[in-house]
Amino acid sequence: MSAVSLVGSVRIAPYMQLPAILSEFGIELREVLAAAGVQADIFDSPNNLVPYPLIGKLLSVSAQLTNCDYIGLLLGQSGRLAIMGLAGQIALCADTAGEGLQKFADFFSLHNTAATVGMTTSGGFTHFVYAVAEPGMGDTSHIQLGAMALGFNILQELCGPEWLPAMVTVACSAPTNLRPCQKFFRAPLRFESDQSSLIFESHWLDRPLSPVDPLARRRIDAEARALQAAVMADFPALLRRILRKQLFSGECSMDLVAALLGMHRRTLDRRLKMHGMLYGEVLESVKRELACQLLRDTQLQTQQVAESLGYASAANFCTAFRRWTGITPSAYRRLAC
């Protein structure tokens, strides 16, 4: 599989340990690949790009055949910044952990164009949040848990081995056996959350990082920015990632999003019309995908899902959901199980 740009794709690097994990359970990789409908050559190079829905299916099949519903944890707990490509390299070029984490978030799309990460800080605590932005995903529970395990390692790498989160939230149901998760995270865990996040005291962001050779720093920065320009050329996908990130805080006004894109509201409107799209339609599409994810992967009450999407009431959310899908949220949840 050639490493060419794909919409909604991820580098296979964080999943390179899957064959070894399957082997430990006595499962052959080719059996899983065949059942998931995935090409056998995806593990030929860590830089191979794979559509995110295929990753979700691959992990779901792996969990079923191994009878291990925390397989995402097993994958994520071995990850480090080194496997994150240019996004990981540029994070280590920062002066402080906070700057490094922000750079990682800013350039995350160089590694994964189907999801987004971001930071919010309030009351002395920082939330490092991961969210799927790709439409049409199936079960994301293994991806969500794996992302939190990988994020845990990245934060320890930036903040030091003494760093621990105050809480870990995961936007999926809890695995049957919680002990491996508890042993790894060493912090309070809250599954059935509306977002996957690592919450920690903000003072950790001030930790200085080891200095990097200035020439190497400039080279990595130039490579990252050149590649990012190519990734950002897919304007609809870029807008979806920004909107998914803005749903963290509920601030999704067209004026604000246009400012984040460095353009006027009218320019954003023109860009969207060039693609035959309207801002409100894209925002509703992102909300629909998040609603389906939460209804499918968690047992959150309808009112909680409505609040996560910024609706004033469950009734308003149910009306919107029926308009999107033709069925009620409860009916969707029953069909998704």
Image (cartoon, grey):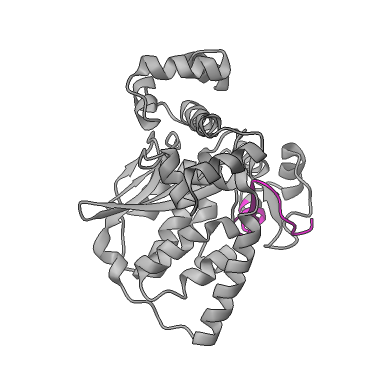
Q: In which quarter of the image is residue 229?
A: bottom right
Residue 148: x and y in percent read 44, 50
Based on the picture, tell me whether residue 124 belongs to the magenta stretch.
no
Q: Which is more toward the observer, 31 or 187?
A: 187
Q: Is residue 127 left or right of residue 19?
A: left
Q: Which is more toward the observer, 202 or 165?
A: 202
Query: Which stretch appears magenta?
Result: 1-21
Q: Which is more toward the observer, 180 or 44?
A: 44
Residue at the far left in the pictured view:
123
Residue 263: x and y in percent read 50, 51
Residue 194: x and y in percent read 39, 35
Q: In this view, does 56 lie above or below 76?
A: above
Based on the picture, tell me whether residue 3 belongs to the magenta stretch.
yes
Residue 174: x and y in percent read 42, 36
* Quadrant occupied by the C terminus: top right
* Quadrant occupied by the N terminus: bottom right
Q: In this view, does 16 lie to the left or right of 201?
A: right
Q: Give the residue drawn at x 57%, y 18%.
A: 325
Q: Is residue 47 above or below residue 188?
A: below
Residue at the far front in the pictured view:
266
Q: Is residue 177 above or below residue 333?
A: below
Q: Note whether residue 71 is visible.
A: no
Q: Give the residue drawn at x 56%, y 63%.
A: 84
